[in-house]
Amino acid sequence: MTLGEKIASFRKEKGWSQEELAARLFVTRQAVSKWERDLSVPELDTLKRLASEMDISLVSLLSSNEDHLEEERPLGFTDFRLTAVYLGMAAIVLAVGSGLALLPEAREELPLLAMAFVVLGLLLLEIVYLLLRTALPIKKVRLLYNGNGLRVFTWRGEKEIPFTSIRKVAAKTHGNWRLGKLVIETEGQTFVVESIRNVNDVKTIIDEVLYQNKN
């Protein structure tokens, strides 16, 4: 049974219309219709509310029968807020550099001006590096999973990670934001998936899936 079929079956068991289920989940009827036809997938916050309504775990909701083990389902959605922050920082550094270059007083102190440009240049390179890590790849979903493992998209490329090879999963958030990066350690390699929305919830789901696969 696919996720869409589960949602439709649950809704009909409750005797709810698509509008009634949509109201409970704070979405539109059109969204529910697309889920039930497997044309789209609810985002993580909505999946949590849906699992709560159905009184099952997120893993049970997202899991499917053996016939659908190869079907990939999105899990980690991208949040570009950090990318916007780094873009703003890069703009500030460029503005400061331009301002220094236009100051008549600075031109008279060439050694100091050169040193300032070296520092600003190094800072700009670091910001560009962080910008690339958080912006690439430009995808709505950066982590998918099926019955066998994960498929992750990082700025270095795409990688299939079997559940059997995963040794540890860690979530690192940025301040009070719920976005962050997911660090997946395997037997011989570490993968860092940046800019994941609700990263702690994503880690919880992966931990539950790993536990089920080990038991």
Image (cartoon, rainbow, N blue to C red):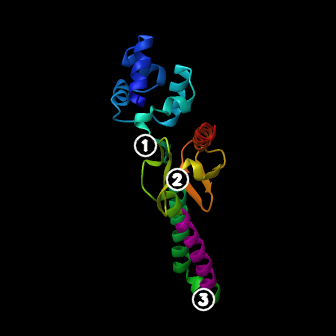
* Magenta-highlighted residues: 113-130
Q: Secondary structure at mark 3?
A: loop
Q: Which mark is residue 161?
A: 2
Q: CA distance from mark 2 to mark 3?
A: 57 Å
Closest to the observer, 154 or 107: 154
The label nearer to you, 2 versus 3, is: 2
Q: Which mark is residue 108?
A: 3
- Of mark 2 and mark 1, the one earlier in the sequence is 1
Q: Secondary structure at mark 2?
A: strand
Q: Looking at the picture, how far across and down is residue 26, in whole percent?
A: 46, 25
Q: In the rendered view, would you say 38 is above or below 19?
A: below
Q: What amino acid is at disc 3?
A: Glu
Closest to the observer, 18 or 71: 71
Left or right of residue 202, residue 144 in this image:
left
The structure residue drawn at horizontal position 36% and vertical position 23%, both measured from the top left corner, is 29
Q: Which mark is residue 72?
A: 1
- Of mark 3 and mark 1, the one earlier in the sequence is 1
Label 1: how many Cα within 10 Å (few below 14, some 14–19, many 20+):
some
Q: What amino acid is at disc 2?
A: Ile
Res 96 seen here: no
Q: What amino acid is at disc 1?
A: Glu
Find out whether the residues at labels 2 and 3 contact each other: C-beta distance under 8 Å.
Answer: no
Q: Main secondary structure of the magenta part?
A: helix
Question: Quadrant of the image for the N terminus?
Answer: top left
Q: Which mark is residue 198?
A: none
Label 3: how many Cα within 10 Å (few below 14, some 14–19, many 20+):
few
Q: CA distance from mark 2 to mark 1?
A: 13 Å
> Quick check: is 127 in the magenta stretch?
yes
